[in-house]
Amino acid sequence: MPSIVDGLLDAAQRDLGYREQSNGYTKFGEWYYANVDKSDSYFKTAPWCDMFVTWAAHQAGVEEYVGEFAYTVDHAKWFRQQDAWSEEPEPGAIVFFDWSGGDSVEGIDHVGIVEKVDGAKVFTIEGNADRVWLKRKERDPGKIVGYGLPRKVQENLGARVESASEQVESAAVGSASEPPMKASAVQHVSVSARQPFAGVTSELPQVQDATASAAVLVALLCTAVAVKRVRDRRPAHAVGGGGRSHRASGWSRDLFA
C-alpha cells in the first residue's frame, strides 16, 4: 500500500494540464457536488483549488487524513484543530497561500499540494492555477501561510486509538483483579431479589462481570470519540452551508492563483 505522500502525489499528477471550461465548470467541482456536498450546484463552476485537493485525496484513499473541503480557510483551521499544522514544507503537505503576504489563516486565498522541496524553493501541484489550469508551480515562500500535514493527522489518530486501546485493556484487567463479593452478601441479596417471584433466581454474583463489561464499553466509546474527531472532516459551518456563503467569504480570491 503506497504511503500518503506517494498516493496523494500520484493522484494529483494524473490530470496535469487539465483546464476548466469557459463557464468555470470543472470535473472536480462536479465530483465534489455529487460526492461530498449537494447543498449547492454552484460547486460545479466555483473556484476549485480545494475541491481538487479533496478529489485527489479520495482518489488516493487518504481523505481521512487530508480532509474534505471547498473553502481554504476552513481547511487550514481543520489542520490546526488536528494539531497537524506546520511552517515547514514537506512533500505531500497541503500548502496554503495568502497573495498579500500575510500570515493569518483568515487571509488564505489558495491551496495546493507540495510535490517537492529544494532548499528554499517549494514546488507544488495546484488546481485553478493561473486562473484555469491544473499545473505545477514554483512558489514564493513569502506568500505561504503554512502547511497542513496529512502525515501528522494519521500519526495523531494512531496515537489516540492506541491510547484508547490501552484504556480498554487497563479497565478489563483492573475489573478482573477486584476481589469477589462475600458469599453471605451475595446470598442475602440474591434471596431478597427473588422474593417477589417464587422460583426465579437472580444472577447477582455476576455484577462484577457486568462492571468489567461496562468499563470496557466506556473505553471503547473513548476510542470511537478519538476516531470521530479526525473523521469529522466537513464541519457543518464550513462546507455543509453550501457554496453561496463561500462565494461571499473568500472563494473568489482563489482566482488570482
Image (spheres, rainbow, N blue to C red):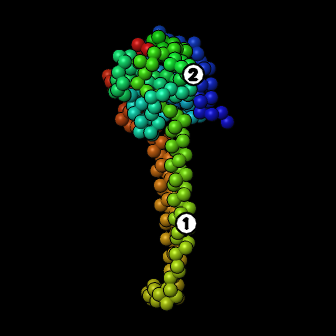
> In this rendering, does residue 108 appear at all?
yes
Give the structural element (helix, strand or loop) at label 1. Answer: helix
Q: Position of residue 154 (x, y in %)?
A: 54, 40
Pick whichever, 107 or 51, lies toward us. 107
Pick whichever, 36 or 7, lies toward us. 7
144 lies above or below 35: above
Pick whichever, 254 or 81, lies toward us. 81
Q: Which mark is residue 172?
A: 1
103 lies above or below 189: above
Dot 1 alpha-carbon crowd within 10 angstroms: few under 14, some 14 to 19, many 20 or more: many
Q: Position of residue 76 (x, y in %)?
A: 42, 30
Report which residue position mark 2 lands on: 116
Pick whichever, 45 or 246, lies toward us. 246
**Residue farthest to the front?**
119
Dot 2 alpha-carbon crowd within 10 angstroms: few under 14, some 14 to 19, many 20 or more: some
Image-quadrant location for residue 74? top left
Q: Position of residue 214 (x, y in %)?
A: 49, 66
Q: Amino acid at mark 1?
A: Ala
Question: What residue is rendered at 54% in x and 35% in y?
Answer: 151
Task: Using the numbered discs, state the Cα–Cα distance from disc 2 to disc 1 in whole angstroms.
Answer: 47 Å
| Mark positioned earlier in the residue sequence (2 or 1) | 2
